């Protein structure tokens, strides 16, 4: 059985977990002295201004600001808390939602080894690729001599290879990019959470959240639609019979049409995810300009 994306996704999950923890730890170490110095100066200056009466602020409001600052600092600089809860949440929630959205479609006539990876998308991509490559191999074997029928089988095999590579390659690449970007954003998270401390840098946190939402939606929307399309593609491949009774043109045409439709849907899914995440960032920008 063809297995490429299943072990690849499993290895990516393992590496991305270590990467996010390593990067976030180094970011926390790097920003801790800067934040400590900045907050110390800020509290001293603010306290002096309050005592001199230059700033009229109720004690309750001041204490609220202190508590808010303490919560942000503990979340941004607490390596154990951030890596155990926040970073893992960023990495795993899209996959969990994708599994919930995909439902039974991801398991149509296929059962993957659960020890390899939790990603049903990877298992289904491998299944679709295996079906397409198997039909291409059958076509090459039946090609035989360079007769008219042999050329038709060779043509079918080549086009089947192209359709399969495009179908699974585009979908797999989209998910891989989204997972890598989520791992990178999770690793840099403490820096953007710390940006919440100051009004001038708060917009960086908002944009970080928008990017996390965008790439998370890529994974979820992929599960919602492309998982279904891959199931159709794989089932179609299993139904193509190169026994002389089925018209070869029918098999070629069906595979290419399914591939083109699936790639077009994938393109729109990516635009939809960017639009939803980007729309969130755009609303934030409008609110900032209105202040």
Image (cartoon, rainbow, N blue to C red):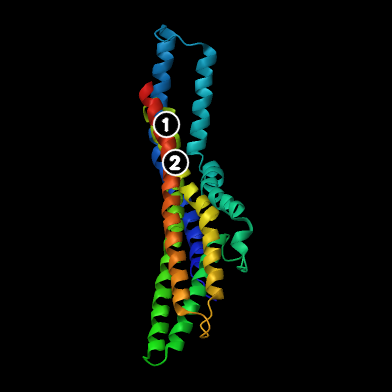
Residue lying at 51% horizontally and 26% vertically, measured from the top left: 68
Percent x, y for residue 231?
56, 64
Tell me, yes or no, if residue 253 can be seen here: yes
Q: Residues within 10 Å of mark 2 (few under 14, many from 20)?
A: many
Percent x, y for residue 74?
52, 34
Percent x, y for residue 168?
46, 65
Percent x, y for residue 232?
54, 65
In this figure, which residue is indicated by the disc labeled 2? 277
Give whichever of 260, 29 is nearer the camera. Answer: 260
Residue lying at 38% horizontally and 22% vertically, measured from the top left: 290
Give whichever of 118, 32 is nearer the camera. Answer: 118
Give whichever of 284, 170 is nearer the camera. Answer: 170
Left or right, 151 with respect to 95, comes to left
Q: Residues within 10 Å of mark 1 (few under 14, many from 20)?
A: few
> Which of the 4 image quadrants contains residue 117?
bottom right
Task: Give the distance between the C-alpha atoms of the residues marked 2 and 1, in whole angstroms.
Answer: 10 Å
Q: Are the residues flagged by discs 2 and 1 in contact, CB closer than 8 Å?
A: no
What secondary structure is found at the residue carrying circle 1?
helix
Please state, as top left, top right, bottom left or bottom right, where the C terminus lies in the image.
top left
Residue lying at 61% horizontally and 52% vertically, measured from the top left: 100
Please state, as top left, top right, bottom left or bottom right, where the N terminus lies in the image.
bottom right
The disc, 2 or 1, on the residue closer to the chain's N-terminal end is 2
Left or right, 26 with respect to 98, comes to left
Tell me, yes or no, if residue 28 can be seen here: no
What secondary structure is found at the residue carrying circle 2?
helix
In this figure, which residue is indicated by the disc labeled 1? 283
Residue lying at 55% horizontally and 59% vertically, measured from the top left: 228
| Residue closest to the far top | 53
């Amino acid at each position: 059985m063809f297995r490429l994306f299943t072990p690849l996704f499993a290895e990516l999950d393992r590496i991305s977990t270590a990467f996010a923890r390593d990067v976030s730890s180094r970011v926390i170490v790097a920003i801790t002295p800067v934040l400590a110095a900045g907050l110390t100066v800020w509290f001293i200056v603010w306290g002096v201004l309050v005592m001199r009466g230059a700033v009229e602020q109720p004690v309750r409001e001041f204490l609220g600001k202190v508590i808010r600052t303490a919560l942000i600092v503990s979340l941004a600089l607490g390596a154990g808390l951030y890596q155990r809860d926040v970073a893992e949440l960023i990495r795993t929630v899209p996959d969990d939602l994708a599994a919930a959205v995909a439902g039974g479609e991801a398991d149509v006539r296929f059962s993957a080894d659960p020890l390899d990876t939790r990603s049903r998308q990877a298992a289904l991509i491998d299944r679709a690729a295996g079906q397409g490559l198997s039909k291409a191999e059958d076509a090459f074997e039946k090609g035989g001599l360079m007769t008219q029928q042999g050329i038709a089988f060779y043509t079918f095999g080549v086009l089947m290879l192209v359709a399969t590579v495009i179908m699974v390659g585009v979908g797999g690449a989209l998910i891989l990019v989204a997972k890598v970007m989520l791992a990178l954003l999770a690793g840099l998270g403490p820096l953007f959470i710390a940006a919440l401390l100051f009004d001038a840098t708060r917009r960086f946190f908002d944009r970080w959240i928008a990017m996390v939402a965008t790439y998370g939606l890529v994974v979820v929307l992929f599960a919602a639609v492309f998982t279904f399309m891959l199931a159709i593609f794989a089932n179609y491949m299993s139904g193509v019979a190169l026994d002389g009774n089925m018209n070869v043109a029918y098999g070629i045409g069906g595979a290419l049409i399914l591939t083109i439709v699936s790639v077009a849907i994938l393109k729109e899914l990516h635009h939809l995810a960017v639009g939803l995440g980007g729309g969130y960032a755009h609303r934030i920008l409008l609110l900032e300009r209105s202040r």
